[in-house]
Image: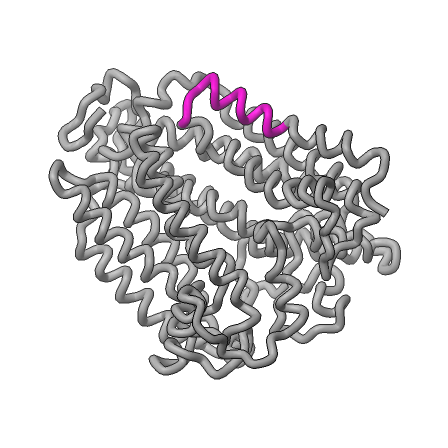
Amino acid sequence: MWPTPWSLPLLVFGLLPLGYVAITAARRGLAELVSLKCVGVLFLWTGYHLSPWIYYFLENWDRFLLVDDLLDDGLAFSTLAMVVFIAGCTVAERGKHDEQDASCEAAIQAVRPVRGIHLAWLCAGLVMLFLIRVGGLSEAWASTSDRGIRGLELRGTVLFYVAMLHPMLALATACMTALYVLQSPPGLQARRIGQGFLCLLVASLDAIWNFSRSAGYPFAVLAFVMLRARGRRGAGIAVACVAIAGFLGSVAYSSRSQYHPGLGNFLKAATGRHASVEEPDGIAQALAGETNPLDAMSAWTLKASLVDSEQPTFSEEGIAALLVLQPLPSFLLPTRPIGPSLNEVRGLDDTIGLTTPALAEAYYAFGVWGVWVMVPLGLGAGWLDRQFRHRPGLVAWFSVVLYFASFPLGLHNGLRAASRLPIYALAAVAIARQIRGMTQPPGETASVGEGIRACSLAPRVSRAAYPRRHAGIKT
């Protein structure tokens, strides 16, 4: 039974990466707190250590997925993962940080102006994909099916692959909206914030309709970008965005067992009106009752408990894990699951949707050595942060947002889903650098405008290149 004599030392040891984040932010400023390195550690700690701390003091963690005999193993493994991730970031971001403040302001200047018509086209595409995914206007307002049924109906069809474009387009819209708000001319900031919030709400429609815990994540993207670009001056908008994201996610997560999907049903849940499901599913209610909606530890312990009974080997599960990390789409190079799914373990159908965290799959396939999957993740985060500081631009912004979104995604999805966004982000920056190199004559340094026109990745910046005050940007 948990806790054991080792539990408290392991919990305290897990605070060391947080301490490192706090010390680093104190030394380098708020901009460092929203670096990919620090954000990654914060998400990992919240997903794997917050719930055990709550359980340790309240002793009421009655979870449907929890195998408490393996909690200490999960604490040790996740702490080691955070340490390895920090080490990878530190190695990749070698160099001085004295250009951080200048480059954050330069990053705003280094992007072509985002116009309202751009956001309008993005929102129109999102609405079209959303209606395809849910099956029309009536289903969009109040579906008659349970959560997960629509996805099963579309699986294997052309519409299924079309609907898969929605999450990426929603992230792109959130990123473009953030830049649109950042580029507000004097006197138009309030108007642009209102327009931006409306666009973010459109980007959230699919998650709201499905009562997903990620219902407000586009607002979290805006908060992240505001803090990264403006620091303390963006804290007000960031706090408002976090509050909206928290409210939407809380309503969706706590009410998902009582309502069918639908925007109208979500409004009923938000206003406390009667539920559309007369007999809520007991399992869904148990999962929705978790104190920490980002908790990944309970699912980790259940997956880890299968190691003794299934006896996975590298020749089978290890190779399967390596195959899911390859960048090609699954329909070009099919992959197979890494061990039994949690639905199979608990005897549930696919409509419940018990997902396996990325670290759980890594542990199942490689054992303790699975922690090394954090090495490339940390190296990529550190390299991308370094590229962003020196060459900000539209590609750099979008890539950073993709990497940021991969951290919470990895808490509730396997290695395949969690690795897609970092791979796409790093590939985008690498390709942009190559394009810029081909369009720039040898020995000539391109200007900011030329670099943006070539690949939306600006050349290296310095304090001398960007004075402290820019037109339309208060400092």
In the rendered image, residue 60, in percent from the top left (x then y), is placed at: 72, 51
In percent of the image, x 76 and y 33: which residue is there? 10
Residue 152 placement (x, y as % from top left)? 55, 77
Residue 165 can be seen, yes or no: no
**Who's the residue at 31% across and 31% down the image?**
230
Q: Residue at x 66, y 43 (%)?
A: 48
Near-viewer residue (354 or 105): 354
Magenta span: 17-30
- Image quarter (top left, top right, bottom left or bottom right) of the C terminus: top left
Residue 14 lies, in percent from the top left, at 68, 32
Q: Is residue 169 magenta?
A: no
Quick one: which residue is furthest to the left in this view? 187
27 falls in the magenta region: yes
Q: Quadrant of residue 451?
A: top left
Q: Specify whether 213 is left or right of 45.
A: left
Is there any visible trace of residue 92 in the rendered image? yes
Most foreground residue, 101 or 235: 235
Residue 45, placed above or below residue 328: above
